[in-house]
Image: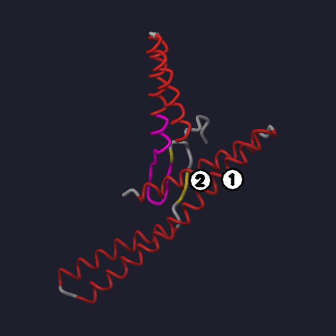
Amino acid sequence: MSDSNSSTFKSYVDQATGAVQSAIGSLTGSAGDQNKGEARKDKASIENDLSHTLGKVGPYNVSGSGGVSKDSSDRTQGSCDQTVGSAKESIGNMVGADGLKREGVEQNQHGKGLEAQGQLSDLGQGVGDRVTGAVGGAFAGVTGNRDQQQRFQNQHDDGKTAQRSVEHDLSK
């Protein structure tokens, strides 16, 4: 999916390398080295941002690395239950219907639990796919099997997208 293989760790290493190169350029009076170091830091910062970029449409997620994932049905249903439960609770408050209000609170709580269960599932699957993709891709690279290496890279990217989707939802 992605040949650039943007990663958070790599971007941190590149930022540190750029800072060192810039500092050396500053100490030696080499404007060229200083500029190259600053450019490397800027590029690494952009790659770091790209590593965390996520587009979401309904239950589908797409990352900057090209990975695609779909939220578990528990996440989708849990979110829906929370919305409907909140609406019932609000309407129950407005019209003084305690039964509707209680039903809304219960449905909202159930939805939160269901969504959390789906997030755990997606996070576990995402991390597993990232690890399997990275290890499998490295092995395929050693054996020279480029097709298999690309399949593992795709699995890694899809896993990263699933993981970033959960992280994004949890940061709200």
Residue pictured at 22% horizontal, 88% vertical: 97
Query: What crowding class fits label 2: few (fewer than 14 Cα within 10 Å), some (14-19), or many (20 or more)?
Result: many
Using the image, determine if residue 95 lies above or below residue 114. below
Mark 2 or mark 1: name the one nearer the start of the chain.
1
Asked if residue 54 lies in the magenta stretch, the reply is: yes
List x then y, in percent, for residue 139: 77, 44
Is the Cβ of the residue at disc 2 closer than 8 Å to that at disc 1? yes
List x then y, in percent, for residue 39: 46, 22
Residue pictured at 45% horizontal, 34% vertical: 45
Q: Nearer the viewer, residue 155 or 57?
A: 155
In which image quadrant can residue 168 be found? bottom left
In which image quadrant can residue 26 be found? top left
Range covered by the magenta-colored residues: 46-62
Judged left or right of residue 128, residue 30 is left
Q: CA distance from mark 2 to mark 1?
A: 9 Å
Which residue bears the numbered disc 2?
159
